Amino acid sequence: MNTLADDLYVDNSQPDIDKMHIAESFLKLHLLPAIETEIFPDRILRSLRAHAFMCRPGTWRNRRNALAHYFNFADDVELACDIKMMVNPVTDKAADKGTRALIPKKQKRTHKVIDDEHTKVVSYLERTNDQAVLGAVIIARTIGVRPSEMASMKFDDSHQSIFVTGAKKRRQGDRGIDRTLILEPDDYLIIKEAWAQLMIEFNRKDASPERAMKRVQNRLYTVVRKVFEERESYPSLYSYRHQLGSDLKASGMDRVTIAAIMGHASVESVNAYGDRRHGGRELNLDVSDESLDAVKYTKLSTPPSVSKQTTSSLEQKDAAKSDRHTTRQPVEDIAQDTEETSNTSNQNVDNEDSLTPSAPIPYQEKGRGYKAVML
């Protein structure tokens, strides 16, 4: 039976550079002043325990593991084991309610990125020549993939399509899907070039590829804090994903197609991303029929007054697949149509995204699909 000390050495023939940097940074910035007669190991443990009240649990766990890794390679295995065995005092099951209430709150995040804000971020990244972060921003803005999905994207030049492996996909099939996104030739080349720029970070020889995307996100956070000094919340790669959700809703695209593009297994998840009032970009983004088939057959909940006029997600899929570029049912028209139905029965309906009338309402599309304007 392996001991904890044995486990520390598993797959650790070489130090993890990222973990070593995290540990060195902690020792430099967060090590508390020594108390009289206090030995160094106790000082480390006390500092790490106090740090739990200043950062999110996930951040604390990463720093604890980094310190254990650091002292393991410093030949202080006993201290490394003590650090590894530490439990966060704020999230400890034995902690009282008062202590657990001290868990630091999540940072405020914005769910929209207007064109002017995007231009400022891109301009700063171009001036500082951070190609990897710039590539990630362009990918997130144009196709809205999750940060964890960017590295594994596969490009098909013959069809100008990108296969995205769903990061949230599970065996049960209840979360996340793989999807194939179809772009216009110009946009496809832009994304392919942006991906090559992002891969610069993953191919660095002085840092581990496993934490490449985390480094990109951290550098983007540093950038937006400099660009938007007086803001309380800052744009992130996920902010761009939310913005694309808003643009897709505002475009009038049907819910099943939106779910497939965003990588959702269910149309119910469409409600969590974007607000059509914050959208408006012209998009040219499509998805394969196989991706539409992967969206779950989820029947949307509706008030009793309009239940007879609803359609299932299966019917929405068939409509989307049969003619995806001539007749669609805009999300905003769903609200208008159901509002009329509700007025007839003297009932108020507030959730416009949960209502689907029986017949789709045609609208005029511009050219092929939805044009994505790149800045």
Image: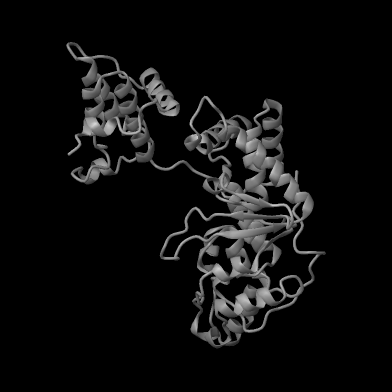
Position of residue 93 measured from the top left corner of the image (x, y, whole percent): 21, 46
Identify the image quadrant of the C terminus.
top right
Residue 228 in sight in this render: no
What is the count of numbered marks? 0
Does 217 sit above or below residue 142? above
Does 22 sit above or below residue 370? above
User: At 60% across and 87% down in the image, what residue appears?
Assistant: 344
Residue farthest toward the top in the current orientation of the protein: 36
Query: What sort of colour scheme is used for the picture?
Result: one colour
Residue 79 in sight in this render: yes
Left or right, residue 218 beside residue 337: left
User: At 74% across and 77% down in the image, what residue appears?
Assistant: 362
Position of residue 230 measured from the top left corner of the image (x, y, whole percent): 58, 33
Position of residue 156 measured from the top left corner of the image (x, y, whole percent): 69, 53
Does 68 sit above or below residue 345? above
Position of residue 283 measured from the top left corner of the image (x, y, whole percent): 73, 57
User: At 40% across and 24% down in the image, what residue appears?
Assistant: 20
Identify the image quadrant of the N terminus.
top left
Residue 70 lies in quadrant: top left
Does 201 sit above or below residue 268? above
Residue 352 lies in quadrant: bottom right
User: At 65% across and 79% down in the image, what residue appears?
Assistant: 337
Residue farthest toward the right in the current orientation of the protein: 367
Between residues 38 and 353, which one lies in front from this camera angle?
Answer: 38
